[in-house]
Amino acid sequence: MADGVGSSGSIVFDDRPSESPDIERVWQGCSAAVDGMTSIATAHWTLVAWRVGREWRVAVQGPETRATTAPVPPETEFVGIRLALGTALERLPTNRLVDHSTEFPDVSRHSVRIFGHAVPLPGYDGAEELVQRLVRLGVIVRDPLVRDVLRGWQPDATSRTVRRHFLSASGLTPGLLRQIERAREAAVMIRTGAPIADVAHDLGYYDQPHLARSLGRFIGHTATELRTGAAGQLSLLYKT
């Protein structure tokens, strides 16, 4: 595991950060003796490519507002490019992609056609070049107001305008997006040994039951399960 927090199970993940302002994380994995995992909630859009045998498939996964159990095909390779918050695919309706994915049908062994443009398959080493190309083509777009708000800057806009920008860029309200990110941070802290009471206090939960409800909804497991490894196979969980 590179730069990430490992999870027990039979999917081996490698992941890395990116210097691209449009990419949050790049990851790759390979499944073995596992047929499912807990897919934790995420506020990000993700470009995913996977190969079963010789056949490649490519999809874009929208934000996930709750933890779910996801099937995992055996003997499958995966590559994912998790886009930065405020970055999305321009022609896809964000509200319809929340908790859903869209697969691109025109895929060859080396390329995929996205909105009429033939581009290389998503790759672990070529992620930045691919995303930069999609930005130039207007396929991937950024919302600078969303990014400014997430950095803690105070925009010259009403709360209603800010909410509209968040919904347009991610399909999520600012409040729900922050809840998802906070739960992920809590899970990372718990798995790396931080006392549960300290996690609740440091991240602004009202109390430990409030933290427990958040973990159940967004991570799908209790703090004890995360601490002991009883949570089993999780989707990618990492320190930002």
Image: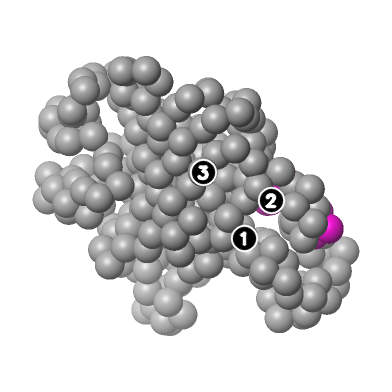
Residue annotated with mark 1: 184
Task: Name which residue lies at 62% across and 60% down.
Answer: 184
Within 10 angstroms of label 2, few (less than 14), some, or many (20 or more) residues?
many
- In three-dimensional space, the C-alpha distance between marks 1 and 2, rounded to whole angstroms, equals 7 Å
Residue annotated with mark 3: 12
Disc marking residue 219: 2
Segment colored magenta: 217-224
Q: Do the numbered discs 2 and 3 sit on residues whose CB atoms are within 8 Å?
A: no
- In three-dimensional space, the C-alpha distance between marks 3 and 1, rounded to whole angstroms, equals 20 Å
Q: How is the image coloured?
A: one colour
Disc marking residue 137: none
Q: Locate residue 21, reporting x and y percent.
A: 28, 65
Instruction: Give the answer, above or below, for where 107 lies relative to 62.
Output: above
- Give amino acid for label 2: Ile
Question: Along the line of sight, which residue is nearer the eye, 144 or 48?
Answer: 48
Q: Locate residue 30, reporting x and y percent.
A: 46, 36
